[in-house]
Image (cartoon, rainbow, N blue to C red):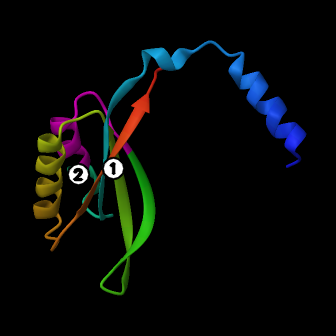
């Protein structure tokens, strides 16, 4: 992209209202698990995260074997709740482990 376009793009954004003043700083958690027992996983998630969650379907590899994957994203929960849900899902799916990620984020509702 030419430098002129970058400067123009920044100028447009800089004139926007500063909605980021109302931002929330917190963590987002992601739980990666095998794509099995989906309805039971949703029940576990509904019990732990009454405010909501998001799921993504994908594929992953564990010890060299391809498997269907569900990525569960929870915005603004506690580490304790994320770990509890991950443990329940791990036990449900009889898995050796599930991956839990924690990322600092700033969010706004528009």
Residue nearest the viewer, comparing 57 with 14: 14
What residue is disc 1 on? Answer: 72
Where residue 14 appears, as percent x and y from the top left, is 70, 21
Q: Which residue is pictured at 29% across the width and 33% down the height?
A: 76
Where residue 90 appears, as percent x and y from the top left, is 15, 62
What residue is disc 2 on? Answer: 41
Whether label 1 touches label 2, CB < 8 Å: yes
Q: Is residue 105 above or below residue 86?
A: above
Instruction: Write down the quadrant of residue 91 in the picture.
Output: bottom left
Give yes or no for residue 53 being in the magenta stretch.
yes
Instruction: Specify start and end residues of the magenta stretch as a single range.
Output: 41-54
* Label 1: element kind: strand
Q: How crowded is the residue under tag 2: few (<14 C-alpha within 10 Å), some, or many (20+)? A: many
Q: Which residue is pictured at 44% across the width and 58% down the height?
A: 57
Q: Is residue 27 above or below residue 64?
A: above
CA–CA distance between discs 1 and 2? Answer: 10 Å
């Amino acid at each position: 992209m030419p430098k002129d376009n970058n400067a123009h793009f920044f100028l447009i954004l800089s004139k926007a209202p500063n909605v980021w003043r109302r931002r929330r700083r917190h963590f987002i958690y992601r739980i990666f698990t095998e794509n099995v027992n989906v309805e039971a996983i949703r029940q576990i998630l509904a019990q732990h995260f009454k405010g909501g969650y998001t799921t993504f379907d994908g594929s992953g590899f564990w010890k060299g074997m391809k498997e269907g994957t569900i990525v569960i994203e929870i915005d603004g929960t506690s580490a304790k709740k994320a770990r509890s849900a991950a443990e329940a899902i791990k036990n449900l799916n009889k898995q050796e482990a599930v991956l839990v990620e924690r990322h600092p984020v700033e969010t706004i509702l528009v």
